[in-house]
Image (spheres, grey):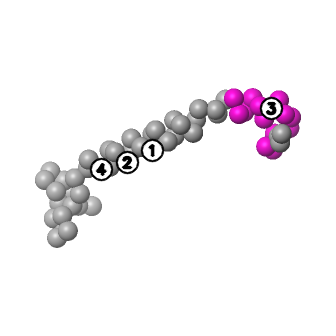
Amino acid sequence: MTRMGHSTVRAAMTYQHLVGGRDQEIAAHVDRLIEKSKKVKRPKKDGQAPEGGKIN
C-alpha cells in the first residue's frame, strides 16, 4: 500500500475514509448542472434572444 504523499499510512487511510463518497457527490452535481443547462432556452441562430431572454 502506498501512502499517497501522506506522512503515515494512518494519515492516508484517514484521508481516504473522509473523501470516500465524494466522487459520487461530484458526479451527481455535474449531472444536475448538465440537466439544468439543457432546460435553458438558447438564442436563435439569427442572433435574436429567446423569449424573455437577453443576448450578452
Q: In the rendered image, which residue does mark 2 sit on?
A: 34
Mark 4 is surrounded, within 10 Å at the Cα level, by few (under 14), some (14 to 19) or many (20 or more) other residues, namely few
The picture quadrant where one finds residue 47 is: bottom left
Checking the image for residue 30, the label placed there is 1
Disc 4/disc 2 C-alpha distance (Å): 6 Å
Q: In this view, does 45 lie to the left or right of 5?
A: left
Quadrant in which the C terminus appears: bottom left
For mark 4, give the secondary structure: helix
Checking the image for residue 11, the label placed there is 3
Image coordinates of residue 29 in percent, x first then y, are 45, 39
The picture quadrant where one finds residue 16 is: top right
Checking the image for residue 38, the label placed there is 4
Query: Which residue type does callout 1 highlight?
Result: Val
Disc 1/disc 3 C-alpha distance (Å): 29 Å
Mark 3 is surrounded, within 10 Å at the Cα level, by few (under 14), some (14 to 19) or many (20 or more) other residues, namely some
Q: What stretch is highlighted in magenta?
A: 4-17
Query: Which residue type does callout 2 highlight?
Result: Ile
